[in-house]
Image (cartoon, rainbow, N blue to C red):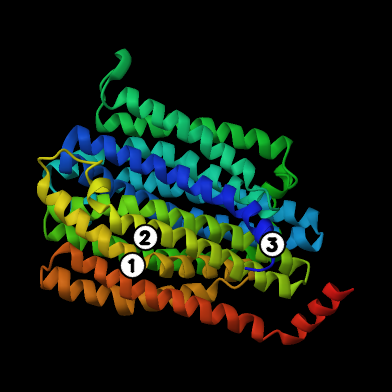
Amino acid sequence: MKDKKLVKEVLYISLPAVSEMILYMFISVFDTMLIGLYGGQTAVSAVGLSNEIMFSLSSVFIDLGVAISITSIVARKYGAGYKAEADQYASMGLSIAIIVSFALCYLLFCFCPTILSIAGAKKAVLSLGTNYMRLALLGLFFKMLSTTMDSIIRGYGNTRTPLLVSTIICIINLSLDYLLIFGNLGFPELGVMGSAVSMLVAQICGFTFVVFYTLNLSKIKIHINFMLKFQLSKLKELISLAVPTSLEEAVFSLSRLLSLSMILHTGTTAFASNQIATTIESISFMQGMGFAAAATTLVGIKIGERNYIRAQQYGNACAFLGGIAMTICGIIFFLFPGNLIQLFLHEKEASVIYYGTLCLMVGSVEQPFIAASLIYAGALKGYGDTKTPFVISLITCWLIRIPLMYYFIYLGRASVVYAWCITIIQWCADGLLMFIFFERKFKKNKFRNNYSKRRLNL
């Protein structure tokens, strides 16, 4: 990257977004670590499966659905100078998020035993997972609303305030984890339920802070009249972006849940190994998500300004820098997999450590391809194209991942390591296709690029 100004601009937006994602994932890593030390593979399986279901559905409807569409539209309207419209879209988006979040948490609360059972949980895992999920859902509700308001703030290029929110949540959550799971410093020993209580308290605190900031300090404001009175044309535009994005995450998350169910079918050792390796890999994954969020904002703002040359440059720069960051993580995963896995379990869980180590070594190979997939998808969404990432995800998840998982893992009962080899194939195809369609998107607009060049030369 020879354009130092471009790199600085990308890093200015990207690094806080990356740090925010890493902090949230650090909470998950720390939770899994303490729960594994407290209750072994049964506790890890119960909490891991519950979290996969909750956060997968949250991602489908809010994190990578409504929230991404809000960021995309707000960025383009803000870049074009239409602040009043940005306020209106943000307010409508928050109303949708409140309705969807409440409905989702209510349904999960009522049917969580059935859902966990369908996902493959049995006996102790089912009982523990049900109790944990019902309490954790209260925290999830506040998390989804905080994520929506973060997306509004991020839309005008402010990634530092969402980072501050995540820092507050992280400090409170991890502190309470330490106190409540094991009963340290005179606090009650709540075990797995202590993790759910910690999440609830931390998310309420984060939500309170971001509400205050959004109402008083944000450049994009929330207006009650816009929240209560929807303009049909704008609602359609918001939904037309949110639905493909939600469907993209839905096909991916559902394929993940089906894959996890197939892995759990082979035994709790395989599932726990996969869950711990996935948790560690998520540290790298969150870096890609951070650069993807930055790409959505940066590309969206430049599209709003009709500066198509810079929009393309921002997308490629985010992918390049994100690829470097995730590749470095991959090297660490390959060199020190055993050391990382052992942080989560006692030495007596030798089989889980062994398979988890192999999974993490295999997973190290897919990191740059995951980066390309996530970041170019984020750039396409910033452009306003949410359909292409959905179609690509549909193809790679359901024509590559699920058939191979079904044949090798469910029918063949192959080692869990094979599941990670399958995901390498999936991410390679996904990353390559995202890059190709991102480049095609701008080639179709050569006349706009020429217009941008003339503007840059003025």
Mark 2 or mark 1: name the one nearer the start of the chain.
2
Residue 270 vs 23, above or below: the answer is: below
**Residue that mark 3 sits on:** 4
Q: Position of residue 229 (x, y in %)?
A: 70, 51
- The kind of residue tagged 3 is Lys
**Could you tell me how far apart the alpha carbons at marks 3 and 2 are, in whole angstroms?**
26 Å
Instruction: Indicate which label's residue lies in the foreground, 3 or 2.
Output: 3
**Residue that mark 2 sits on:** 330
Q: Residue at x 50, y 73 (%)?
A: 389
Label 1 sits on a secondary structure element that is helix
Mark 3 or mark 1: name the one nearer the start of the chain.
3
Label 2 sits on a secondary structure element that is helix
Label 3 sits on a secondary structure element that is helix
> Would residue 308 be visible to someone looking at this image?
yes
Q: Position of residue 170 (x, y in %)?
A: 46, 35
Crowd around label 2: few <14 · some 14–19 · many ≥20 (10 Å): many
- In-image side of 343 versus 157 (left or right): left
- The kind of residue tagged 2 is Gly
For residue 297, what is the image quadrant?
Answer: bottom right
Q: Position of residue 120 (x, y in %)?
A: 18, 55
> Would residue 397 be visible to someone looking at this image?
no
- The kind of residue tagged 1 is Val
Instruction: Indicate which label's residue lies in the foreground, 3 or 1.
Output: 3
- In-image side of 323 versus 55 (left or right): right
Residue 124 vs 378, above or below: the answer is: above
Q: Which one is in front, 435 or 212?
A: 435
Q: Are marks 2 and 1 in contact (CB under 8 Å)?
A: yes
**Residue that mark 1 sits on:** 365
